[in-house]
Image (cartoon, rainbow, N blue to C red):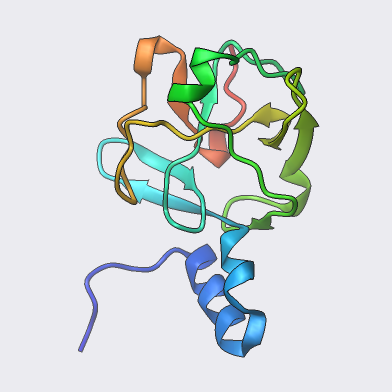
Amino acid sequence: MKIGRKLPVGLIAVFVFLAVGGGALAMDHAVMKMTKDGLGSYLTDAKMMTLYWFKKDSPGKSACSGPCVEKWPIYYRETVTAGEGTKAKDFGTITREDGRKQTTFRGYPLYYWAGDKAPGDTNGQGVNNVWYVIDPAHFPPKM
């Protein structure tokens, strides 16, 4: 029987890693590329929750603090397993002005959107024309 939807290569790699004995912890650190009609490719964490970038950020520095972080929680993992369309060197860590650590993608801090409730939600896309999903093939965008 054929399944109608192809799994992303990154997700397949995570499943293989877990099957070989990598444990649940490994999956917690994976970043995967997903695709959605009308949106295209975007990055998610291992639970398929969408990751976003903030247009007001600059490489290595977050411009989102205080109430902003309540709506846009930071994404941080000590290590990240790179999925399809990414490389391990694409990910890094910054220390924010509030002292917290935050994972970056190609230098830009990563966030969740509090309005995303289920895996695959992309409700933060385009909020206030400054919050966007990340298509690894076209990131960072030319401004």
**Left-right relation of 62 to 97:** left
**Left-right relation of 20 to 100:** left
Quarter of the view holding residue 98:
top right
**Left-right relation of 3 to 131:** left
Using the image as rendered, state which of residue 62 and residue 125 is in the foreground.
Answer: 62
Residue 84 image position (x, y, % from top left): 57, 57
Residue 49 image position (x, y, % from top left): 42, 47
Residue 5 image position (x, y, % from top left): 27, 67
The relative height of residue 141 versus residue 66 in the rendered view (above or below) is below
Using the image as rendered, state which of residue 127 and residue 84 is in the foreground.
Answer: 127
Image point (64%, 68%), residue name: 26
Image point (62%, 88%), residue name: 20
Residue 51 image position (x, y, % from top left): 49, 38
Quarter of the view holding residue 91:
top right
Image point (50%, 16%), residue name: 68
The relative height of residue 132 versus residue 81 in the rendered view (above or below) is above
**Left-right relation of 34 to 92:** left
Q: Quadrant of the C terminus?
A: top right
How many numbered markers are drawn?
A: 0
Q: Quadrant of the N terminus?
A: bottom left
